[in-house]
Amino acid sequence: MTAPTRTASVLLVGNPNVGKSTLFNHLTGARQRVVNAPGTTIGLAEGTWRAGAVDVTLIDLPGTYSLIARSPDEQVAADAIAAEEHDLAVVVLDATALSRSLYILGQVARAGRPVVAALTMTDLAAARGLCPDAEALAEALGVPVVELNGRTGAGAATLSGAVEEALRTCPRVDGIVPRPPDHQLGDELAHAQQLFDWIESVADRTLAAEEPRETLSDRLDRVLLNPWAGVPAFLAVVWTVFQLTTSVAAPLMDAAAALVDGPVTGGVTAVLGSVGAPAWLESFAIGGLVAGVGAVVSFIPLMAIMFACVTVLESSGYLARVAIVADRAMRAIGLDGRAMLPLIVGFGCNVPALSATAVLPHARQRLLTGLMVPLTSCTARLTVYLLLAQTFFPAHAGTVVFAMYLVSIALVVLFGLLARRTALRDVRPEPLVIALPDYQLPHLRTLALGVWARVVSFVRKAGTVIMIAVALLWVLQAIPVRGGHDLADVPVEDSVYGVTASALAPTLAPMGLDDWHIAASLVSGVAAKEVTVGALAQSYALEDPGDGSTATLAAQVRATVEQTSGGSPGAAGLAFMVFVLGYLPCMATLAEQRRLYGWRWTAGAAGAQLALTYALATLVFQVGRLL
Amino acid sequence: MSGVFGAVMERLAAGESPRAAARTLGIPADLAETVAAEAERFGLVIRAGAACGTCTPGAASACAGCPFAR
């Protein structure tokens, strides 16, 4: 064996999972150690390897797709490639995804490093009919290309010779101009574009042309993304979801409610009676906890069906298409299409939707979108719609709930247009560009597990919120403010809760809803929208009808609204739903808005939203009662 | 934007997936996917699902009924 005449530092570079570390282990064997990358705690594998007459220190860099780093690992790779002290880079190319590998090779070449390419996965590529010709590739690149088998190590000796030779000749990649030392970061996009043109020319010379074949995704997209068919298709999907939800969930919800109202309430009453519990405890347990938590239990079937529908739409790739369709509609009226993803999330919950505005690049766009988010109708509001739709429109509940979502979309657009033409005139709309996934069939087991996890999370979270809210409401209902009653022995109308709600109720008269139960539930709903139905149930449950009857919540609400609306319960019911949709965001949403935009924007937007929704709900009732 | 990068971006903006864009343009699928991934690094493209990136498993930042939060 020839004695080494010199030493060299060589970087091993490549995309993740291309066999880079297998190659590293094969070349260095036991002669390796882990060192920290300079100035970091990220470990780098470093080993020694004899490349012909050269003793090589080989450094296995973290796998990366680009030198525009997005993680500490990628930054380590980018820094190492930019550093001057390394003599050569061995770039591992994945033959099954050659263009992707060529991008990192081009970036390494642009950093000024001499390059040797190691072509792996050729057996897999050949099986797919993709295998590039190594000789043609070497000719196109202008640097040595060595075909390697990562598993067997075949080709390692050739690589050794190529590296020894390259350390002497410093081969540079044809068609790539090393970047100057004083390059600007702003040039990176232009250079990336040049690199992609270079990759295309290399691929043209080394890869067989693929026969373009239309897939099922292409055929579906031709319909679902069509400007004329896409929106009706989306509306049909949403309508179907609500029909399914209301028709399947309603009997299950009734059964759950009957279970709570009957055996559970009876059991709790019997237990408390048998231990001689005081009247206030019975009132708290039955009128507070059982009524409030019962509302959560009765909504479990609804939530399970909604979760299943949304999971199917999301995992199939359709939800991302909705963003594209909505983007076009939004841009047509001068709004920013990129706001669509956070707004779609808002239909699930407003709080993460506000966080999701982080995908927007400009602060003013984030602000505008963040102010529109509370008008997207979150799932918690669905529980109120469903109760009211089944109360006032039992034969068309699904269609009415669907209409509420259309109203929500209309309000979002209206609010956005108003904001764009007043306080946020400087926001420039830009298109949404999204990397769409291909359509996929949802996996049944994954779907079932996902729905189960979400239902458990719903019961835990909503149950906790409801328990806390119900306890607080019960305390407010136990404190008398008139009538000379004792603490915890007071009719609700004479409690802090009842008197406050009664004082607010007349403001709902223009909507035909001048009633303290409704006012109280709306105030409670600001704490969390899930509480609205629970609070309504609780306020009715605490009242003694005096005739021994036990009317259902829906019947009680209908009787109340019959009276407050002057005989137009349908119009008042619709106005109720419209008001619930937009009157005020929940506390969590307000807190998140204040954190992101400050209290002035938050208070201003909440005030504008309240005024807009109040006017709309009033209009709905006043027009509706005439029809 | 110019060249193959601009062409892929144009197809993505028209609502095509990276693979569909590759078929339309007659380029390798992984080239279009690399363009999309790099454009995302430049902030020009949003990855589907990125908007809900805040909802990690067990995230407390969403209300109980959010079907997106995991």
Image (cartoon, coloured by chain):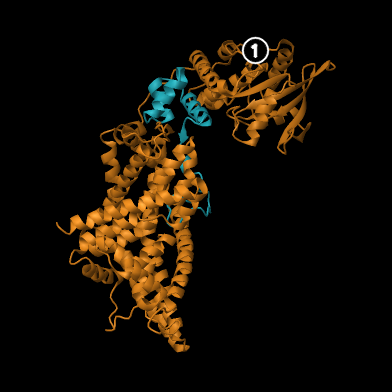
Q: Residue at x 66, y 23 (%)?
A: A154
Q: Quadrant of residue A292?
A: bottom left
Q: How many numbered tags mark residues here?
A: 1
Chain coloured orange here: A
Position of A317 with respect to A333 (left or right) is: right
Q: Quadrant of residue A153?
A: top right
Residue A423 visible at all? yes
Give the camera-side residue of A101 and A594.
Answer: A594
Q: Position of residue B25 (x, y in %)?
A: 40, 20
Q: Residue at x 41, y 36 (%)?
A: A338
Q: Which residue bears the numbered disc 1?
A: A172
Residue A271 visible at all? no
| Residue A109 drawn above or below residue A449 | above
Q: Position of residue A511 (x, y in %)?
A: 25, 60
Q: Position of residue A548 (x, y in %)?
A: 29, 84
Q: Position of residue A554 (x, y in %)?
A: 28, 68
| Residue A393 drawn above or below residue A114 | below
Q: Quadrant of the N terminus of chain A?
A: top right
Q: Quadrant of residue A323?
A: top left
Q: Residue at x 69, y 17 (%)?
A: A158
Q: Quadrant of the C terminus of chain A?
A: bottom left
Q: Residue furthest left?
A: A627
Q: Colour of chain B?
A: cyan
Q: Which amino acid is tagged 1?
A: Arg
| Chain of the residue where label 1 is placed in the rendered structure | A
Label 1 packing within 10 angstroms: few (<14), some (14-19), many (20+): many
Give the camera-side residue of A357 and A115.
Answer: A357
